[in-house]
Image (cartoon, helix red, strand yellow):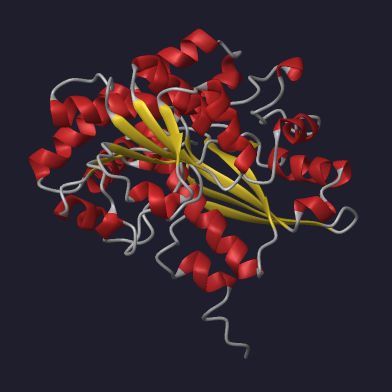
């Protein structure tokens, strides 16, 4: 008999990543679609999470990523106060090579077959235009263009939520939410990061930026000839003298065994997902006296926006909800202090409590 102890079934049922309500493996031979849809929890409502389109090295890697991402969405949606559980989908393959209208339509049919248990949106490798196509086959699709009844780009509210998290960290640590004259390092000034810089400069913060794309850096420097400077890379940014806040807004894993020991900032609050490279990093930050605002809490503005599409998008209503990230972040810091644990652990406890107290969707 074939040994599958290290295969997909092991990942689904027996690993630490298990415990999901439902995992759907999707294949459409005509279009070349291979996808995984993972529903971690529907205790709070239909699972909500984006669709990632990525050239995974193996099917096992794709399944593992879908499970991890779906679990993360359960926690994010719970902490955002949304009536949604967590789900995520991954499409296997290089979107530059295999993404077609036929493939997206086939994917939409698979999502529709779940009857509303999963609501999809954009993620890495998928865009607003793609969701417009998926929506032709599936009404449980968000992240669409305004022309098709959606809210469009969610980066505006994502950055606003991160900004609120920074203000909460300032209130907790320094007794004042103002960021005026604070020195903030922003790693990654793309869709979300450049909006974050606007918030910071509007309040009078000094900003130091870096990005792998020179044009992105130049755009910011041209717009802000005063109050903004640039460094060569993230390695230089985290070592910048006098940094108050570090905002990772690019790739995950920014907080690791190499970066934490040399980080000069006293607060970490950024838009990137999965900033903690591995379990234990949150304790390393706390041991150094660095206040960490959990990423999935402060970057929830985007998911708040796409969730609102289901009710007829209203920007002011969404912004009001995203502003509550300030209070939520403060509550996490207070819980962490009360329980004697890092903020990341406190956020997990609060999210788990909300999910445990909810009745599963029937």
Q: Residue furthest right?
A: 30
Q: Nearer the viewer, residue 309 or 249?
A: 249
Task: Give residue 18's position: percent from left, percent from top.
Answer: 45, 62
Work out whether residue 304 can be spotted.
Answer: no
Say left or right for 182 vs 64: left
The residue depicted at 16 percent of the width and 41 percent of the height is 336
The residue depicted at 71 percent of the width and 41 percent of the height is 113
The residue depicted at 50 percent of the width and 45 percent of the height is 250
Q: Nearer the viewer, residue 258 or 169?
A: 258
| Occupied quadrant, residue 104 | top right
The residue depicted at 35 percent of the width and 60 percent of the height is 256
Task: Give residue 163's position: percent from left, percent from top.
Answer: 38, 25
Task: Give residue 89's position: percent from left, percent from top.
Answer: 62, 48
Say left or right for 221 vs 149: left
Task: Give residue 171's position: percent from left, percent from top.
Answer: 19, 24
Give the quarter of the figure containing the N terminus: bottom right
| Occupied quadrant, residue 315 | top right
Q: Is residue 90 above or below residue 46?
A: below
Work out whether residue 255 can be spotted.
Answer: yes
Q: Is residue 195 above or below residue 42?
A: above
Q: Residue furthest front?
A: 225
Counting labels gives 0
Q: Residue furthest bottom?
A: 1
Q: Is residue 102 above or below residue 82?
A: below
């Amino acid at each position: 008999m074939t040994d599958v102890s290290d295969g997909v079934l092991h990942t689904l049922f027996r690993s630490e990543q298990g415990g999901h309500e439902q995992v759907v493996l999707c294949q459409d031979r005509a279009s070349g679609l291979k996808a995984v849809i993972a529903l971690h929890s529907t205790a709070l409502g239909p699972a909500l999470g984006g669709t990632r389109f990525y050239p995974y090295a193996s099917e096992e890697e794709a399944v593992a990523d879908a499970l991890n991402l779906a679990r993360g969405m359960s926690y994010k949606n719970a902490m955002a106060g949304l009536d949604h559980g967590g789900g995520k989908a991954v499409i296997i393959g290089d979107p530059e090579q295999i993404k077609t209208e036929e493939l997206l339509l086939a994917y939409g049919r698979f999502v529709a077959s779940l009857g509303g248990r999963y609501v999809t949106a954009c993620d890495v490798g998928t865009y607003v235009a793609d969701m417009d196509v998926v929506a032709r086959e599936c009404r449980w699709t968000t992240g669409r263009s305004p022309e098709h009844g959606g809210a469009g780009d969610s980066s505006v509210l994502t950055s606003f939520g991160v900004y609120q998290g920074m203000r909460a960290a300032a209130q907790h640590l320094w007794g004042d939410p103002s960021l005026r004259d604070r020195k903030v390092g922003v790693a990654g000034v793309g869709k979300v990061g450049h909006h974050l810089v606007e918030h910071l400069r509007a309040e009078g913060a000094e900003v130091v930026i870096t990005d792998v794309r020179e044009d992105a850096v130049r755009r910011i420097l041209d717009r802000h000839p005063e109050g903004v400077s640039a460094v060569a890379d993230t390695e230089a940014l985290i070592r910048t003298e006098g940094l108050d806040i570090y905002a990772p807004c690019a790739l995950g894993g920014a907080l690791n065994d190499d970066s934490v020991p040399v980080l000069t900032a006293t607060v970490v609050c950024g838009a990137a997902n999965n900033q903690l490279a591995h379990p234990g990093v949150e304790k390393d930050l706390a041991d150094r006296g660095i206040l960490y605002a959990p990423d999935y809490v402060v970057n929830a503005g985007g998911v708040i926006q796409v969730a609102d599409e289901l009710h007829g998008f209203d920007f002011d209503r969404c912004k009001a909800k995203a502003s509550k990230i300030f209070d939520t972040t403060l509550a996490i810091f207070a819980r962490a202090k009360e329980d004697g644990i890092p903020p990341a652990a406190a956020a997990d406890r609060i999210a788990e409590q909300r999910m445990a107290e909810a009745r599963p969707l029937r």
